[in-house]
Amino acid sequence: MQITAAALCEMLQGSLEGNADSVVDSVAKIEEGHSRALSFLANPKYEEHIYSTESGIVLVSRDFKPSKAINATLIRVDDPYVAFTQILSEYIAQINNKEGIEEPSFIGENSTVGEGLYLGAFVYIGKNCKIGKNVKIYPNVVIGDNVEIGDNTVIYANVSIYLHCKVGADCIIHSGAVIGSDGFGFAPQPDGTYAKIPQTGNVIIEDNVEIGANTCLDRATMGSTIIRKGVKLDNLIQIAHNVEVGENTVIAGGTAIAGSTRLGKNIVVGGQVGIAGHINIADYTQIGAQSGIIGSIKEPKKAWMGSPVTEFKQHFKSQAVFRNLPELDKKVHDLQKEIEALREALNNKG
């Protein structure tokens, strides 16, 4: 990416202060900038860096009032963080603007691909697949039979998508993710062994979903495991068979969700959370890191934390008591000694 301050200003509908011809070709933190880098200032605690930054252009808020001279060209916008995110999206789009089919690769019979396809080396696409327009599939991806992938989706290296799964448009699936592996279903037998329950369903991923590296989405036993539109999944997440994750829900890394659980929309789940199977989580719920959920959360718009979870404020009250347990234990021990002494004194008087 190479762009002038004037062009950036027009793109972001901002106002410019400084050299309109200043050119940037990369992005950088404001404290690590260089003459051809674009940076931004959104958090006031980083303001000191804007007076010494070497970045050529810095995005600032419209109401920013500098207290010293600034060498960089400034572009004033409504929200510097949002504007910088927009620029980063353009930057990444240019980097990832690949097309063409590399060899060796394989496309099975009756499979169709849209225009603008990039297919990296050693990609395998099975039979009867439908691949949309401008899809980018990086090397060593394996796509099973009867899979559908929507327009503008990016699938990074070493992803596996099992047969019959569906991926929507504008999705991103990062390296090592596995979509549609068997759910963890086994029937106990009289002799103590376990018989595998065939997993005959699939995984459906709707539009604008991002799936982190090495995250696993199990296929349903029957029916579908469903990831609704706008969901963002971090790295190393396990989602079991027949789970449904509601739209615009965000889940941090290390979380595991057991089978047939349903998460509502706009839920925020912290890292390393464990969620039991066959329960429901209400819309707009917030769950703190390392929490354990063993029953349904029915009331929406509440925050929870702990294992097992309690309401957020109650959890921290409990933690305050827990921290004082050693002192409370000593007080109880001292009281026991005083009671024994009083008993002994009363017995001696008798």
Image (tube, grey):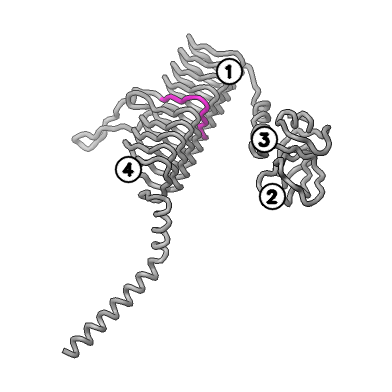
Residue 139 visible in rendering: no
**How far apart in space, not on screen, are marks 3 and 1 (Cα)?**
40 Å
Three-letter amino acid code at the position of disc 1: Pro
Q: Nearer the viewer, mark 3 or mark 1?
A: 3
Apparent side of residue 118 relative to residue 259 in the rendered image (left or right): right
Question: What residue is disc 1 on?
Answer: 104
Q: In the rendering, at what x and y percent does residue 69 appear? A: 82, 49
Element under label 1? loop
Q: Residues within 10 Å of mark 2 (few under 14, many from 20)?
A: few
In the figure, residue 326 lies in which quadrant?
Answer: bottom left
Give the distance between the C-alpha atoms of the residues marked 3 and 4, in whole angstroms: 41 Å
Q: Residues within 10 Å of mark 1 (few under 14, many from 20)?
A: few
**Marks 3 and 4, the one that precedes in the sequence:** 3
Residue displayed at 78% across by 49% down: 52
Is residue 161 on the magenta stretch? no
Task: Read off the residue under disc 3.
Answer: 83
Q: Secondary structure at mark 3?
A: helix
Q: Which class describes the residues within 10 Å of circle 3: few (<14), some (14-19), or many (20+)?
A: many
- Disc sitting over residue 295 in the figure: 4
Q: Amino acid at mark 4?
A: Gly
Earlier along the polypeptide chain: callout 4 or callout 2?
2
Amino acid of disc 2: Tyr
Residue behind mark 2: 46
Residue 204: within the magenta?
yes
Which span of residues is magenta-colored? 203-212
Q: CA distance from mark 1 to mark 2?
A: 49 Å
What is the crowding at mark 4: few (fewer than 14 residues within 10 Å), some, or many (at least 20)? some
Residue in front for this viewpoint, 120 or 221: 221
